Image (cartoon, rainbow, N blue to C red):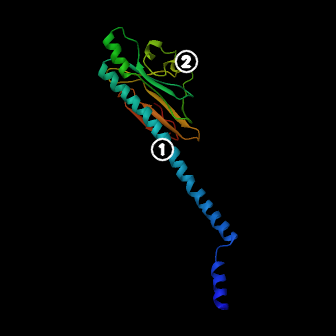
Amino acid sequence: MKRSLATRRLRSSSGYTLLEVMLAVSVLIILATVASSPIMRTWRDQRLAESTENVRSLLAGTRIRAVDNDQTWQFRYEPGGTHFLRVPLAATESENDEASNRSGQQSGTLPDGITFETDDAGSAPPLDPKLLVGLPDSQELSSAAWATPILFYSDGTATQALFTIVDEYGGSREVLVRDLTGAVTSRRPTAVESSL
């Protein structure tokens, strides 16, 4: 009987000590910290890439709209801000053209922590309020300071442009518009700036 009581006590006290538990938790915290850094970097890069792709897609759509409507369209973005939009270059008088223009107008904003950066020294003149009619955030857009418009012409050409989208962690992506073809591409910034 003495043996079985001693064996029971030994079995009931065969748990982990506080030191062993603390050591195991410390190791797990260190491993989680080491693993989370690349995961967070990948997530931030993916978020910036997705935001840039949305802007690139709207730019490419602006070229298509200009060719389809046989009319010049413009893309504008807010340097240091988050707003961007696509509108025709000028308001039209015809009701049919006006309805077509309204269907092609589009505005958007970048997610929190992501902004447009630019070398554009001066801001462009304000947009004609008639061009903003029908956009859900027209009041806010009318007071924004815009960069020089990127124009897309009916023959498929565009004004050449290069601008950068940055995030709060120092990540950046460039968006390039080619003048002769109107092609729009996005890329990671190059170490050496090449001339447009």
Asked which secondary structure carries label 1, the reply is helix
Displayed quadrant of residue 79: top right
Which residue shows up at 43% across the image and 36% down it?
Answer: 53
> From what the image shows, is residue 6 above or below residue 71?
below
Of 47 and 120, the residue lying toward us:
47
Name the spot of residue 182 as percent of width and height, x first: 37, 28
Q: Is residue 60 left or right of residue 142?
A: left
Name the spot of residue 108 as percent of width and height, x first: 47, 28
Quadrant the N terminus occupies: bottom right
Label 1 environment density (alpha carbons within 10 Å; few <14, some 14–19, many ≥20): few
Of marks 1 and 2, which one's residue comes earlier in the chain?
A: 1
Name the spot of residue 31 as percent of width and height, x first: 59, 61
Which residue shows up at 54% across the image and 25% down it?
Answer: 120
> From what the image shows, is residue 126 above or below residue 64?
above
Which residue shows up at 63% across the image and 64% down it?
Answer: 25
Of 17 and 98, the residue lying toward us:
17
**Number of numbered discs:** 2
Q: Residue 46 — which label?
A: 1
Q: CA distance from mark 1 to mark 2?
A: 31 Å
Marks 1 and 2 close (CB-CB < 8 Å): no
Q: Amino acid at mark 1?
A: Gln
Name the spot of residue 149 as percent of width and height, x first: 46, 21
Residue denoted by label 2 = 143
Residue 188 visible here: no
Q: Residue furthest front?
A: 1
Quadrant the C terminus occupies: top left
